[in-house]
Image (cartoon, helix red, strand yellow):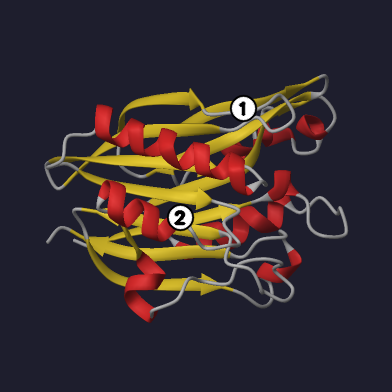
């Protein structure tokens, strides 16, 4: 059975004009019918926006997951007076474990690796969701920390998916993770190029990625154009994978 995975930086539910569009994001994500969803810049709590939708209960990931993805994990990274945000993973399959690892380089950019594990076709499948620094030096350090997490906590014979917003406009991540962790980037393997994902109204930079190990890539799609371009500053990426 192929597994559909989906990755999206939802920019706290706001589009380029700072219009709050979380309900539209939920509708379009649901239509993709993914098995596992990786989300970045998700509000876990916010005093003002938490009251926008009565069914929200204060967290965007619960509102997005409602009735479709019964299992979810959240990694709180940035904390401020009004609330906090971070990364989230939504899953149709039970989440066996989850941990958020702080990989921040300084207090102005709070970053983490949300590491969850599910069981897929009777075997563990590790899910790593990240949102990396804006600076080249900061990202290089975080590449190393991600590699260390993989080497120290994921056995070589267990499959994994690493996805998120890498801010890797210089396109250095793929060679690093191929050499250091035996990972394949789904768009690079499928099309010989990374997906252009930012800005959503005219994708120019290849900031977002989906990497896999121990899985066969069936297909990959970059979701550009309307209505995606009206929802977040990033386009969404999806891929289909299966056990070899």
- Foreground residue among 163 and 70: 163
> Which image quarter is the N terminus in?
bottom left
Using the image, determine if residue 229 lies above or below residue 134. below
> Which image quarter is the C terminus in?
bottom left
189 left or right, relative to 137: left
Residue 119's spot in the image, x, y percent?
A: 21, 39
Residue placed at 17% from the left, 34% from the top?
A: 155
58 left or right, relative to 124: right
Residue 59's spot in the image, x, y percent?
A: 65, 31
The answer to which image quadrant residue 225 occupies is bottom right
- Foreground residue among 186 and 82: 186
How packed mark 2 is, by other alpha carbons closer than 10 Å (few <14, some 14-19, many 20 or more), is: some
The answer to which image quadrant residue 72 occupies is top left
Residue under circle 1?
77
Residue placed at 38% from the left, 71% from the top?
A: 188
How packed mark 1 is, by other alpha carbons closer than 10 Å (few <14, some 14-19, many 20 or more), is: many
Determine the secondary structure under disc 1: strand
7 left or right, relative to 191: right
Using the image, determine if residue 151 lies above or below residue 136. above
The answer to which image quadrant residue 83 occupies is top right
- Looking at the image, is mark 2 or mark 1 earlier in the sequence? 1
Residue 149 seen in the current view = yes
Using the image, determine if residue 140 lies above or below residue 49. below
């Amino acid at each position: 059975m192929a597994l559909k995975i989906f990755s999206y930086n939802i920019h706290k539910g706001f589009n380029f004009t700072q219009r709050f569009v979380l309900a539209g994001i939920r509708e379009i994500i649901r239509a993709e019918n993914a098995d596992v969803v990786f989300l970045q810049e998700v509000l876990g709590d916010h005093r003002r926006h938490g009251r926008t939708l009565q069914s929200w209960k204060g967290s965007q990931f619960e509102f997005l997951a409602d009735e479709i993805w019964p299992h979810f994990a959240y990694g709180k990274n940035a904390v401020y007076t009004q609330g906090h945000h971070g990364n989230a993973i939504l899953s149709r399959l039970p989440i066996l474990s989850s941990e958020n690892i702080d990989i921040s380089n300084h207090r102005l950019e709070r970053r983490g690796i949300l590491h969850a594990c599910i069981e897929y076709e009777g075997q563990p499948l590790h899910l790593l969701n990240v949102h990396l620094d804006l600076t080249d030096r900061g990202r290089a350090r975080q590449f190393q920390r991600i590699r260390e997490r993989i080497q120290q906590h994921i056995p070589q014979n267990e499959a994994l998916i690493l996805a998120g917003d890498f801010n890797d406009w210089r396109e250095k991540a793929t060679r690093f993770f191929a050499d250091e962790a035996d990972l394949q980037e789904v768009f690079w393997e499928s099309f010989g190029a990374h997906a252009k994902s930012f800005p959503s109204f005219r994708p120019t930079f290849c900031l977002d990625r989906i990497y896999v190990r121990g899985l066969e890539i069936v297909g990959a799609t970059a979701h550009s154009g309307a209505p995606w371009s009206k929802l977040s500053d990033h386009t969404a990426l999806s891929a289909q994978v299966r056990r070899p």
